[in-house]
């Protein structure tokens, strides 16, 4: 729920999309080639004409070159794919639609579980059952009118399962916690081909690892998670000139401190002067606050008054909405794009650090930085779920930074480090611990999100359920 959606959509219309690529190498093992004849789902190999489209990551700067891209039709075909990969000395990784891509995938079979499209909402039990091919947009639509919400991401094209097992920070998370902690069951095919239903009562240690540890332990076919009451919602984004940036950032964090259930996202962005953008934003550098309040307009009035008191906004999109409109209110980009991103957590937000953040952003803009988003943490995100409850524990850091540099050409990418460095320096000056794995930037692994004790515990589970390392995560376990 930030200004990033508008800036990216506008730039995508202006710049040609460049898919970064390198030559294909190595031959395909016979067991993998044979999959084209033994399963009904699509099997795309490097020499096939559709390979480039099939392998594409959502982040177009990631040039992943898997040995094959397979779309199994059912559990039996997942077993067949895992067996063929293991027999060929290859790994298996899962990307429903390319989010989370983080490497070359050399020696890996890439599974797209889009055929697993089950979606069941049980309003009485307040639970959802979601197949591994289902994106958040479908879930949000199905929840409309139920009076219930999921701890959803605000981008409708993000996969619900991948997001949920990798931490899952939602604008509802300050009220109800990270999404991983609300997962109540995981169904997966493990490295041996066994279909398993994992719960707190059925392999509690694996259940702990799956709730935050990501796709390390099998090919997930479905998950179940808790839903929460929220009859009315109010929020959206309000955008101001950068001259009010320090006041905007300060107000966002003051609001977060006053209401631990309020979802808050503070944004800073530089918009190009392009006709595709709304006229008030063309060529502007701006600051914004986006929020999600569980309640109606009347109960949200003090929040709105505080924000509108900052000054005259360039755009004001605050309104009542339902869960089915969450994606439209957030207005995040839904097309693949080339970015080099960075994320981290920071401590000590007050007016002094707000001033430092705006300064770091403006310094980065000079080198090509286009946006930074700062999500207020705290609330139930900081509540410790218990050592045996979920791999993703209490995150006590006050805020989470997410930023990126659009890289439509190698030259633009070459400037990314310089553009991101002021933000890295800002975070280093305000050190803290803890991270949501789904917010990790390019080139990172689980060691960047978990402490040593949790990493050791994840390794022990991995060695027990997949001793040969057949199942590969998009975020490697050191």
Image (cartoon, grey):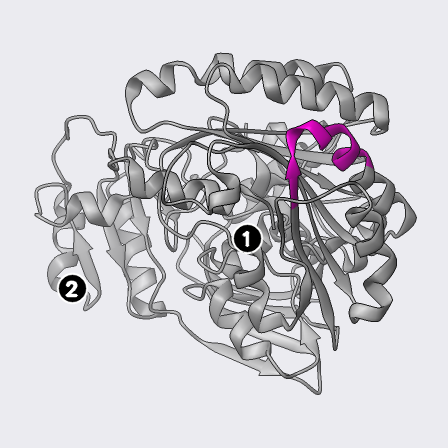
Tell me the residue at 53%/80% (across/down): 120
Question: In the rendered structure, which segment of residues is drawn in magenta?
Answer: 239-250
Discs 2/1, front: 1
x and y, in percent, of residue 193 in the image: 39, 59
Tell me the residue at 69%/72% (across/down): 227
Tell me the residue at 65%/18% (across/down): 360
Tell me the residue at 84%/54% (across/down): 305
x and y, in percent, of residue 68 in the image: 22, 46
Could you tell me how far apart the alpha carbons at marks 2 and 1 are, in whole angstroms?
31 Å
Q: Name, please, the residue furthest toward the bottom.
A: 124
- Residue 241 inside the magenta-drawn segment: yes
The residue tagged with tag 2: helix, strand or loop? Answer: helix
Label annotation for residue 38: 2
> Image height check: is 242 above or below 8?
above
Q: Is residue 473 visible?
A: no
Label annotation for residue 271: none
> Image height check: is 142 above or below 291?
below
Quadrant of the rendering where the C terminus is positioned: top right
Q: For mark 1, what is the residue?
A: 163
> Image height check: is 111 above or below 451?
below
- Crowdedness of circle 1 by 10 Å Cα count: few (<14), some, many (20+)? many
Q: As drawn, is 385 to the left or to the right of 187?
A: right
């Amino acid at each position: 729920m930030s200004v990033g959606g508008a800036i990216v959509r506008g730039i995508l219309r202006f710049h040609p999309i460049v898919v970064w690529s390198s030559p294909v190498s190595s031959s395909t093992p016979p067991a993998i080639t044979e999959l084209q004849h033994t399963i009904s789902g699509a099997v795309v190999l490097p020499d096939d004409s559709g390979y480039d489209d099939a392998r594409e990551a959502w982040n177009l700067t990631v040039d992943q070159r898997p040995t094959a891209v397979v779309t199994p039709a059912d559990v039996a075909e997942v077993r067949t794919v895992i067996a063929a990969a293991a027999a060929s000395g290859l790994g298996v990784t899962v990307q429903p639609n390319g989010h989370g891509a983080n490497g070359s995938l050399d020696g890996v079979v890439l599974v797209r579980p889009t055929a697993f499209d089950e979606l069941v909402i049980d309003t009485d039990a307040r639970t959802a059952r979601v197949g591994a091919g289902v994106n958040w947009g479908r879930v949000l639509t199905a929840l409309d009118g139920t009076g219930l919400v999921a701890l959803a991401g605000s981008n409708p094209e993000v996969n619900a399962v991948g997001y949920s097992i990798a931490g899952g920070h939602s604008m509802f998370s300050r009220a109800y916690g990270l999404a991983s902690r609300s997962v109540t069951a995981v169904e997966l095919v493990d490295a041996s081909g066994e279909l398993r239903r994992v719960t707190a009562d059925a392999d509690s240690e694996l259940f702990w690892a799956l709730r935050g540890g990501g796709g390390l332990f099998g090919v997930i076919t479905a998950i179940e998670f808790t839903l929460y009451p929220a009859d009315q919602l109010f929020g959206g984004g309000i955008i101001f000139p950068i001259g009010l940036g320090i006041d905007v950032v300060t107000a966002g964090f003051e609001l977060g401190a006053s209401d631990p259930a309020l979802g808050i996202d503070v944004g800073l962005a530089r918009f190009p002067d392009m006709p595709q953008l709304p006229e008030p934003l063309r060529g502007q550098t701006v600051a914004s606050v986006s929020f999600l309040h569980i309640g109606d307009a009347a109960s949200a009035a003090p929040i709105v008054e505080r924000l509108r008191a900052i000054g005259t906004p360039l755009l004001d999109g605050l309104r009542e909405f339902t869960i089915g409109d969450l994606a439209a209110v957030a207005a995040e980009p839904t097309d693949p794009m080339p970015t080099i991103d960075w994320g981290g957590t920071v401590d000590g937000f007050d007016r002094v650090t707000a001033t430092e953040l705006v300064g770091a952003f403006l310094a980065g803009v000079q080198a090509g930085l286009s946006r930074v988003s700062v999500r207020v943490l705290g609330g139930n995100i900081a509540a410790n779920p218990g050592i045996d409850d979920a791999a993703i524990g209490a995150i006590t850091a006050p805020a989470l930074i997410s930023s990126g540099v659009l890289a439509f050409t190698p030259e633009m990418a070459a400037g990314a480090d310089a553009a991101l460095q002021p933000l890295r320096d800002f975070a280093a000056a305000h050190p803290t611990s803890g991270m949501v794995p789904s917010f990790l930037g390019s080139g990172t692994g689980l060691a960047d999100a978990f402490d040593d004790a949790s990493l050791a515990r994840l390794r022990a589970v991995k060695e027990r359920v997949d001793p040969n390392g057949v199942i590969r995560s998009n975020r490697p376990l050191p």
